[in-house]
Image (cartoon, coloured by chain):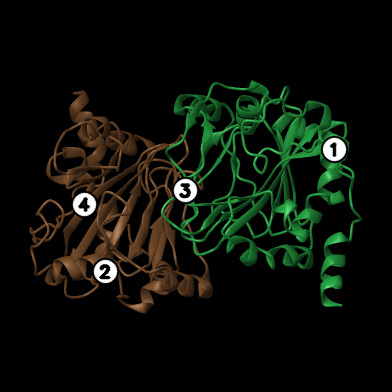
Chain colours: A green, B brown
Amino acid sequence: MRLSNEQLAAFETEGFLFLPSVFTEDEIGVLNGELPGIFSQQRQENVREKGSESVRTTFAAHTFNEAFHRLGAHPRVIEPVRQILDGEVYMHQYKINGKAAFDGDVWQWHQDYGTWARDDLMPEPRAMNIAVFLDDVTEFNGPLVFIPRSHRQGKLNAGHDVKTTSYPLWTLDNSTVTQLAAEVGLVAPKGPKGSVLMFHCNLVHASPGNISPYSRTIVYLSLCEVGNHIRQFKRPEWIAHRDFEPIKSLTDDCLLALARGAAA
Amino acid sequence: MRLSNEQLAAFETEGFLFLPSVFTEDEIGVLNGELPGIFSQQRQENVREKGSESVRTTFAAHTFNEAFHRLGAHPRVIEPVRQILDGEVYMHQYKINGKAAFDGDVWQWHQDYGTWARDDLMPEPRAMNIAVFLDDVTEFNGPLVFIPRSHRQGKLNAGHDVKTTSYPLWTLDNSTVTQLAAEVGLVAPKGPKGSVLMFHCNLVHASPGNISPYSRTIVYLSLCEVGNHIRQFKRPEWIAHRDFEPIKSLTDDCLLALARGAAA
């Protein structure tokens, strides 16, 4: 899977790229089948919503679950990121954000690199997210909302919000968001489960709460060019990883092979 | 303004009817010009969001503001409701819901008649809402979300939620909402300021929080057929009105006439 020149140009201009139905229903089924078991575990990697038992984020599932390990080295996510970052990549952060039906809380306006730079001393924004939809993402279940082109602003001033949700975040103030959105508006890429959304680590984004009866689980792989690895180890290893070895892509059928192995 | 037979049939089947751009930009401008003055008043009719000074709801603005008084007797809102309810109507409740940019909180899943029946002893669901958009309503700023056809279920069981937001509401449980939505899905009518949204008082609805930089103010006129007036006066008069006299429609140009008068 190679991105075309048009796709590369669109990413550079807009700061994101949406690729519908990259994974099949069967492949997503392999991952979704693991979620109840993962979410039910009492472990530090499961951060729950304020005032509820719903899992907000599972960190580092690639380190303790084989299906999510394979997703984290899947050629359909690793290769396009390698192409954009133009080099070998390692896994800086791995999150399953299970925005539960009725319960999923907001993610405030932020840039991911804002946190990676401040908390982890990542030298440059040579890192990015690639998100894999495990549910259909619609206007109703809390889609990611982008301010297109905002990645061109570089790292913006931010404040450390430790109150709004159960997870601390370096967030942007309202006037910055208002000003950026006034120029280009907002975009919320939506699509069926199995779709993939790539976005620049300085792209300003947020997501609303999920009041709908439909869950909205998305896996976020935050990949970093290996030479750009983090310099400060303030956050736990299961949040900001310290294994800077380049990821070797697995084979294209690695998820279905796992299911076949389990069935055999 | 008369609803067609097709529109009446659609309302009966789906439980709502969306009418884009019923009011002009100039007419909406007259109303929006009053909002800062209304929201800044320290009065009991202004219910503010939890933990913020943003106004969640202004009650009864038709009783203390001339522009909103005129909207509450405007033929373009009164006549279609009279047509559907097939009789004279009075104002049961009048709300300006100012879902502020960044601050506007959710409205949980509920039926309006659930509250009117339980709190106010309104005998029958012969009452309904007509909503007037004072801002463009988009996917981003917390649109109203309906479960189409749910009004056919009649009054559903509900619990009194006094915790989630700053305003108490009789809300539906998650399993009821899940079951109803599984049959027909969700719909969020969106459109430019000046649009009008009519919906049955038993239609199940909710609205998400507003994380966007765009405010989303909607005026809700809750009109009731006069013979169906409430029997219990437990809630304050400025929330559930006790003037059951039929509303007499004003002239079609009543909002612009007010502006012309002010300019003169």
- Apparent side of residue B169 relative to residue A196 in the rendered image (left or right): left
Residue at (38%, 39%) from the top-left corner? B103
Label 3 or label 2, whichever comes before in sequence order: 2
* Host chain of mark 1: A
Label 3 or label 4, whichever comes before in sequence order: 4
Real-space Cα separation, disc 3 to disc 1, in angstroms: 51 Å
- Apparent side of residue B123 relative to residue B22 in the rendered image (left or right): left
Task: Indicate the quadrant where residue B177 lies.
Answer: bottom left
Q: Position of residue A241 (x, y in %)?
A: 72, 39
Real-space Cα separation, disc 3 to disc 2, in angstroms: 27 Å
Real-space Cα separation, disc 4 to disc 2, in angstroms: 17 Å
Label 4 or label 2, whichever comes before in sequence order: 4
Q: Residues within 10 Å of mark 4 (few under 14, many from 20)?
A: many
Residue at (63%, 33%) from the top-left corner? A112
Mark 3: secondary structure: loop
Picture disc at residue B114:
2
Mark 2: secondary structure: helix
Q: Which residue is mark 4?
A: B94
Picture disc at residue A245:
1
- Apparent side of residue A230 relative to residue B148 in the rendered image (left or right): right
Real-space Cα separation, disc 2 to disc 1, in angstroms: 59 Å
Marks 4 and 1: which is nearer the front? 1
Mark 1: secondary structure: loop
Q: Residues within 10 Å of mark 3 (few under 14, many from 20)?
A: many
Q: Which residue is mark 3?
A: B191
Of A11 and A107, the residue lying toward us: A107
User: Which amino acid is tagged 1?
Assistant: Glu
Circles 3 and 4 on the same subunit: yes
